[in-house]
Each structure stands twice: as structure tokens, then as C-alpha cells.
Image: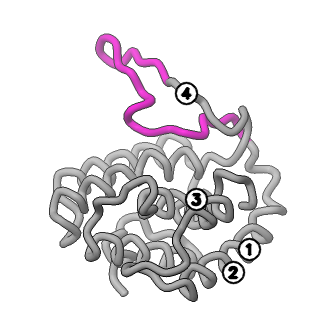
């Protein structure tokens, strides 16, 4: 959480005042992240090999289902929820951009559901639904950043921060009810 490219380091890059989020809201996200950090600290049995920056631009398909994964980040081991959140957030993010923040595009939501259903079916890693919240908060802080993505509409920014706040409150991530996390 405190690493320079994770939650606290990323929060340092946010302006103290902006039109889409107040500094008090950012402080609340940081406080909730501390609680999540302590919750996850004891889950050492979940350590596994990870990529660390798993998103569509780091997966290169060759022929059929033959592929190569590029640009591994932040070490060899970590939590699988980091990779799952990194990949699935793209369905939401581009789904919101496509509709200008009104809703997640239906086609991209269908791909998200397919990815998540398949992942859970193949891995039986249902415990991930108790862990992924903190990783989604981090990933949304990246895409909501005015430094990294300065041209996102105010409506879309609000939805991103609604998701962060709501997901940090969730004991279990309800992946089939993902739309609800974007609402205040």
C-alpha cells in the first residue's frame, strides 16, 4: 500500500483539491486501505506467482490461443487478485468510456462476466472475492488519476470514485452485481 507506485504513492500524485473529488474523500480511501492492508497481511497462504501488470496491452496473441505475456511488474510473487483486477478493470473502464459514464457497455460487460466466470470455474479461487476489493481500489485510483487519464468526464470520475468507496466497504465482492458499485 505504501509503495511508491501503489495506493499511497499514487495518492501523492493527486491534487489536494479537484472538481471531481475532495481531499476528505481521498483521506477516507486511504484510511480504509489501511484497514484492508491489515486484513490481507495475515493471508500469506494466498501468495502465488503473479504478473503484476496484467492487462490487454501486455498479452500478445500469436496464432489461435498461443500467447505471450509482456512487461511483468512488481516482482514475481503476490496476490492473484492483483492480476484479476488489473485485467477485468479494463472491461469496466472502456465500457464506461464508451457510454460516457452512463453505464457499462453491454458487450464489454459480457466479456467481463465471461472472464470472471471462467477464472473462477478453472481456479476454484472463490476466496478471491474476499480479497479483490483492495486491488480494485488501487486500479481505479490509477485510471481515475488526473495525471494518467486527464480527459475523463466528471460523470465518469464520480462513478470511478463511487466504485472505490463502495468496493472498500464490501465484505465480499459481488462480481455479478458490479453495476451497483458505480452508484452512490
Image depth: mark 3 or mark 4 in front: 4
* Badge 1 element: helix
- Crowding at label 3, few (<14), some or many (≥20) Cα neighbours within 10 Å? many
What is the C-alpha distance between the residues marked 1 and 3?
13 Å
* Residue appearing at x 57%, y 76% in the figure: 168
Left of 73 or right of it: where is 76?
A: right
At x 65% / y 55%, what residue is drawn?
A: 6
Q: What residue sits right under mark 4 in the picture?
A: 71
Marked residue nearer the N-terminal end (4 or 2): 2
Of labels 3 and 4, earlier in sequence is: 4
Residue at 76%, 70% in the rendered image: 39
Decide which of tag 4 and tag 1 comes sooner along the chain: 1
**Which residue is identified by label 3?**
135
In which quadrant of the rendered view does residue 149 lie?
bottom left
The secondary element bearing badge 2 is classed as: helix
Check disc 4 and report its element: helix, strand or loop: loop
Q: Kindly state the secondary structure of the residue where label 3 is placed.
A: helix
Circles 2 and 1, Cβ within 8 Å, touching? The answer is yes
Separation (CA) of disc 2 from disc 1: 5 Å
| Residue 64 among magenta residues | yes
Viewer-nearest residue: 58 or 154: 154
Side of 178 relative to 29 (left or right): left
Amino acid at each position: 500500500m505504501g509503495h511508491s507506485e501503489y495506493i499511497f504513492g499514487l495518492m501523492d500524485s493527486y491534487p489536494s483539491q479537484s472538481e471531481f473529488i475532495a481531499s476528505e474523500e481521498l483521506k477516507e480511501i486511504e484510511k480504509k486501505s489501511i484497514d484492508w492492508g491489515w486484513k490481507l497481511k495475515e493471508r500469506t497462504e494466498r501468495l502465488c506467482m503473479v504478473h503484476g501488470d496484467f492487462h490487454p496491452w501486455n498479452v500478445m496473441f500469436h496464432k489461435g490461443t498461443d500467447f505471450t505475456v509482456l512487461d511483468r511488474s512488481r516482482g514475481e510473487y503476490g496476490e492473484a487478485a492483483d492480476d484479476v483486477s488489473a485485467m477485468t478493470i479494463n472491461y469496466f473502464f472502456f465500457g464506461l468510456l464508451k457510454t460516457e459514464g452512463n453505464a457499462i457497455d453491454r458487450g464489454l460487460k459480457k466479456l467481463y462476466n465471461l472472464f470472471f466466470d471462467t477464472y473462477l470455474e478453472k481456479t476454484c479461487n472463490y476466496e478471491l472475492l474476499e480479497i479483490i476489493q483492495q486491488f480494485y481500489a488501487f486500479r481505479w485510483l490509477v485510471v481515475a488519476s488526473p495525471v494518467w487519464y486527464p480527459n475523463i468526464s466528471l460523470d465518469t470520475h464520480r462513478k470511478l470514485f463511487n466504485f472505490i468507496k463502495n468496493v472498500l466497504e464490501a465484505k465480499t465482492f459481488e462480481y455479478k452485481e458490479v453495476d451497483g458499485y458505480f452508484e452512490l
